[in-house]
Amino acid sequence: MYAASLPKIAILLGAFVQIERGQMVLDDQTRAACTRMIRYSSNEDASRILNRVGMENLAQILQSERFRLYDPEFNGGLWVGRDYSDAPVWQRDPLHQISHGATAMQVARFYYLLFTNRLVSPKLTKEMKKILSNPAIEHKFVKGLEDEPDAKIYRKSGTWKNWHADSGVIVHENYKYIVVALSHLPQGGEKLAHLAEVVDDLVKRQHRLPDKGDTH
């Protein structure tokens, strides 16, 4: 599905793979640009970082055997076929012909691989998680979890017209879980906020510590 700004997580991965390869340097300027790209969804910074990574390089990274975050045998996945300016499309998603695409499964795999230290080195993983934390845009999943102040959220969303996407890892004291939603709905932002609230309540019930009086 078209996912607007959510595939900026793919650009983040591309940057950190290039950093790991020694093709980019994680200096203060790069770290700040990546943080603005994720937390504030800065299109200018996303385009700048993408152009440093290279769109062809990013496509190869996403399709590589190492990551398989875009896999044509499994309905595609994360795809960035143009930057976030008015520049022309470089290459559309080979399966679905969209410029910024995602599937819920591959977005979930991104977070799973990140939190199991399978994307980049442990040191760079820590940096990526820090960038994904403390979201600055308080809508959708963040709004839905506003009554859970102790929950830590690692997150990236996307919005364009009626396309509403959100994704992330929600960390509570004794459990954490991945949640991803892609939608094409009017008032989708409000619906995703409600979804986050319901999912969190469901997961919380599954991990509820038994009361002293419970017999089973």
Image (cartoon, grey):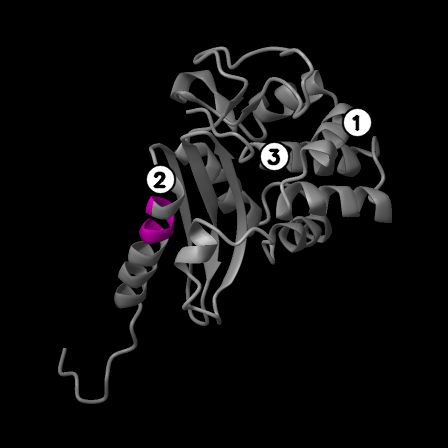
Crowding at dot 3, Cα within 10 Å, few <14 / some 14-19 / many 20+, comes out as: many
Q: Which residue is mark 2?
A: 187
**Residue appearing at x 82%, y 44% in the figure:** 26
Residue at image position (44%, 56%) is: 143
- Label 1 vs 3, first from the N-terminus: 3
- 144 over 32 or under it: above or below: below
Q: Which residue type does callout 2 highlight? A: Gln
Which circle marks residue 52 in the picture? Answer: 1
Q: Quadrant of the C terminus?
A: bottom left
Q: Nearer the viewer, residue 129 or 197?
A: 197
Secondary structure under the numbered disc 2 in the rendered image: loop
Quadrant position of residue 9 = top right
Q: On the picture, is 96 further left or further right than 50? A: left
Q: Nearer the viewer, residue 193 or 211?
A: 193
Give the side of residue 167 with respect to residue 39, left or right. left
* Mark 3 element type: helix
Number of the front mark, 2 or 3: 2
Q: Residue at x 57, y 46 (%)?
A: 114
Q: Magenta segment: does it hold 91?
A: no
Across and down, in percent, residue 22 comes to: 84, 34
How far apart are labels 2 and 1 at the CA level? Answer: 35 Å
Q: Position of residue 113 (x, y in %)?
A: 53, 43
Is 60 on the left or on the right of 146, as rendered? right
Looking at the image, which is closer to me, 28 or 73?
A: 28
Frontmost of labels 2 and 1 is: 2
- Disc 3 marks a residue whose amino acid type is Lys
Which residue is the site of mark 3? 8
Q: Residues within 10 Å of mark 1 (few under 14, many from 20)?
A: some
Part of the protein shown in magenta? 191-195
